[in-house]
Image (spheres, grey):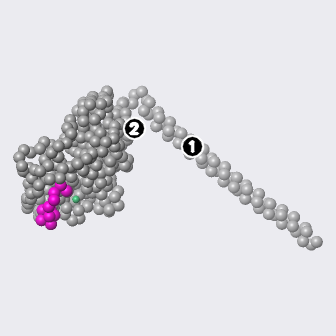
Amino acid sequence: MNAEPIKPSRYQSDSGALAKVAALLLGLLVAVLMLFVVLMWVDARTEQKAVASPAAPSAPAPAHAHNTALPIESFAGVVPANAQELAAAHKPYDATLPPLQAGDVAKIRMVMKDQTLEIAPGVKYNVWSFDTAPGPVVHVRQGQTVEFTLVNGGKIPHSMDFHAARIAPNKAFRDVMPGESFTFRFKANDPGVFMYHCGTKPVLAHIANGMYGAIVVSPTDMPAADNEYVLVASEWYMNGDGITEPASLDMAKAHRMEPDWTTFNGYANQYVTHPLTAKPGETTRFWVVAAGPTLDTNFHVVGTVFNRAWVNGDMSRFQRGVQTVGVPAGGGAVFDVKIDDEGLYPFVSHAFAHVDLGQVGLLKVGDPEGTMSH
Ligand code: CU
Ligand code: CU
């Protein structure tokens, strides 16, 4: 009996505490809701701004209204404010496949140079290079002998490794001391498109610093193409933004595989500003090498399908009707597209982070409206 009155009072005091907690929770809820409303309002304002600016009647049309869905003009890395102007002034790496040398022996000479090159608009990098980065495209005929001379104009040992060669690497690909030169020969019996690079240790640093290029060994028989372009995909790892002063290699980034820029032929987006060209109905051939040093390229041409794809650079057969082909770091492949309709056809690595980082270009077929002819 004694216990009876206690129960309600305890109940009373419990309910009082519960009410306090409920009030506190309600207060918190109101505060959170208010914060949410403020955030939504800020968001709406930003969105309005973003929508409003391009619609402003006085806003000038973008310099390159290519009207494709890709972020082809995005520079994911840091560039100066006048990037578009600098990109237009940049002289692109000539992607055109160079002519063959006559005769049984093709003589190639490269001078290794330390120099500062632009790798994106206003972005400079201290390269180790074979003449330039990528090095010059070597084009030989299947069965031709390559006589290669390497002149080391750099400060440290370098070497040359041709993937197209069957040769003892400890002899032919040996280190050449600064100021020295070295000549070796090999017979290019295997057709395709191959990487070449400096093979001096650490190879990662020598390739990352720009010591790579492509050698095309044209097969004795191959369907004709109207335009032939060579694209070397690669990535840059920088220890600074390269704007205030030239950047050098960041080996830790290279190990983490976190590039600042990815490119075709060494310079971000260069064939967006300076498109490669074809006429409607023509067959365009891309000889593609992925130089890395580490990353692959996933080659794709937007708006078409490969008529022929020599996957892995196996020239004995081609695949038809293929959309995207992986080219591994250190590998090559060949692609034909025949495009009938005038227009701008982006070629990309379909691993889209690479597009944002600069591995994208345009094939301009015909003279589509609203574009300048180059
Ligand atoms: Cu080297
Ligand atoms: Cu190699």
Vertical placement of 267 versus 225: above or below?
A: below
Quadrant of picture, ligand 2: bottom left
Identify the image quadrant of residue 101.
Answer: top left
Q: In which quarter of the image is the C terminus?
A: top left
Q: Does the residue labelled 2 lie within 8 Å of ligand 2?
A: no
Please identify the quadrant where the N terminus is shown: bottom right
Q: Residue type at mark 2: give it.
A: Ala
Q: Give the range drawn in magenta.
A: 163-173
Image quadrant where residue 221 sits: top left
Left or right for 291, reference 355: left
Q: Which of marks 2 and 1 is nearer the N terminus?
A: 1
The percent coordinates of residue 3 (x first, y second) are 90, 71
Depth-wise, is mark 2 or mark 1 nearer the camera?
2
Question: Front-most of 100 and 71?
Answer: 100
Q: Where is residue 287 in the image (x, y as percent from the top left)?
A: 23, 45
Relative horizontal placement of residue 139, taking residue 25 as reference (left or right)? left
- The residue lying toward the viewer, choosing from 358 and 300, is 300
At 32% across and 36% down in the image, what residue appears? 345
Q: How far, Cα to Cα, is label 2 from label 1?
A: 28 Å
User: SS at mark 2?
Assistant: loop
Q: Main secondary structure of the magenta part?
A: loop
Give the residue number, with chain letter if any, for mark 2.
Answer: 69
Q: Name the residue under label 1.
A: 40
Looking at the image, residue 146 sits to the left or right of residue 301; the answer is left
Residue 199 part of the magenta-drawn span:
no
Q: Furthest-right residue in view? A: 1
- Is 199 rendered above or below residue 371? below
Residue at x 58% of width, y 44% of height: 38
The residue at the point 80 percent across, 63 percent down is 14
Badge 1 crowding class, 10 Å Cα cut-off, few under 14, some 14 to 19, many 20 or more, is: few
Residue 172 part of the magenta segment: yes
